[in-house]
Amino acid sequence: MQRTGVIVIAAIVVVLLTGTSVLLSPYLFPRKPDRAAGPLKVSVHELSLPNPGSAEGPPIAVRIWAPHAAEIAPRYPLILYVPGWGGSRGENDVLLSDIASAGFVVAAADDISRDKPDPTADPADELVRTGAFKAFSPQDLAAFPQVSERRTRLGFNKLNKLVYALTRLTSKSIPSTIDFSRIGVVGFSFGGAVAAVALARDPRVTAAVNLDGWVVDTEAAAGVSRPLLALYAKLELHPSPARVSAPTYYVTELAREDFRMLLALSRSSAAEVRLIEGAEHDDFTDARYASRWKRWRPWRPKPIRADRMRSIIQAYLVSFLLRTVSGTPTAPRSPVFPEVTSIEAIEPDLR
C-alpha cells in the first residue's frame, strides 16, 4: 500500500512537471520560425558593395532579402533596415524575411559602430560612433541631445551611402528588380530613430517604421509629413523606487520624455503610435527566439510569447508598408490585438 502511494505521488509529480513544461516552453524556449509568413519565396544574399564615399574606403557589407517570384511584379519597392546601437544586419532576419515575402526587396547593413575608423572623420563624431549607449545618470541625460543628433546624423549618412550603392547593383546580383521610386525605412532602437530622421530629411522615403527607438532630440521631433509607424514596448512609467535601480530610473525618464513627444506627433503629424503590453526591448528583434530561462521572472506581469509578438509586429508592419510604400489601397488594416494600445491611452501617465 505504501509503495502504491509513492507511485501515485510520483505519477502526479511527473504529470505536473510535464504540464508545466508544456505551458512554459513557448516562453522559455521559443522556436525560431523556419519560413517567411508571406506568400512569396524569399532568398537571402550577402553582398559587398563599393563604398560611394571613396574608392579606397571599405566596402559596405549588406544582406538582402529578395522575392524569388520576380514574374509576379516587374519591380519591387525597397525597404531599408537600420539595426540597433551596435547591432548587425542579421539581427532581425525573421521580420525582414516576412516583409520581403509580402513583395519587397529588403536591405540591411551593420550598425555604424561596426564600420572601420575613418581617419578624416570628426573626432567628436568618432567618439559617439564607437561609444556605448548611455542614459543612466543625470549627466547622460544632459548629454543625450547632442549624442542623439550626432549619431542619428551618422546613421542617416550611412543609409544614404547604402541607397546609392544599391542603385549600382548589377541585374544578376539578386533575383528581383528594385523600384527606387518607392522606399521605406524600418529601424530598431537606434535604427528606429534613424528611420524617423530619414523620413524627416529625405523626400525619397515614402514611409518609416520605428521599432522601440526614439524621436526625442531628433529632426523628426518637429513633425513628419509622411506616414510614420511607431511600435513600442509599453513601460511602467512611474515605477516604485524600491523596485528599480538608478540606471533604470534615468532610462525611464528618457522614455517618458520620448512618449510625450510621440503623443504630440500622433496628434499633429502623420504618425501612428502603438504600445505593446508585455513586450521588452529585445522582443522587437530575433533575440525573442533565444532561450529565456536564465532571465525568466515569474512575477513579471503578462509576458508576451515570441510567436504572439511576431504575429503583432508582422501584421502591423506588412499592412502599413503595403499601404504606404507599395501603394496598395486594398491592403488589410492590422487586426485588433488586446495587447496593443494607442499612445493616447497612457496620456494620464505622462503628466
Image: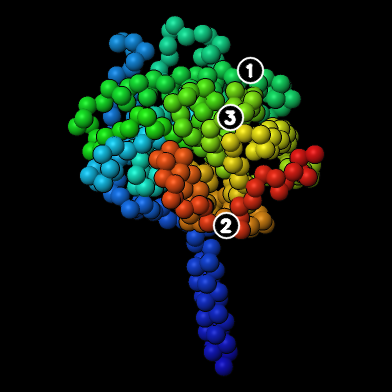
- The mark nearer the N terminus, 3 or 2, is 3
Residue furthest to the bottom in view is 1
Q: Can residue 56 be seen by looking at this rendering?
A: yes
Q: Position of residue 171 (x, y in %)?
A: 21, 30
Q: Position of residue 229 (x, y in %)?
A: 55, 40
Q: Colour mode?
A: rainbow
Figure quadrant of the C terminus: top right
Residue furthest to the left in view is 172
Q: Tell me which residue sits at (33%, 17%) in the image.
A: 51
Q: Which mark is residue 337?
A: 2
Q: Position of residue 327 (x, y in %)?
A: 42, 41
Observer-nearest of 153 and 21:
153
Identify the element where label 2 is drawn.
Answer: loop
Q: Tell me which residue sits at (39%, 20%) in the image.
A: 161
- The mark nearer the N terminus, 3 or 1, is 1
Query: Which picture quadrant has residue 241?
Result: top right
Given this view, does label 3 or label 1 mark the residue nearer the observer?
3
Verify CB contact (< 8 Å) between mark 3 and mark 1.
Answer: no
Per the image, the residue denoted by label 3 is: 224
Verify CB contact (< 8 Å) between mark 3 and mark 2.
Answer: no
Query: Label 2 to label 1, Cα distance in Å?
Result: 37 Å
Per the image, the residue denoted by label 1 is: 146
Give left or right: position of 119 versus 349: left
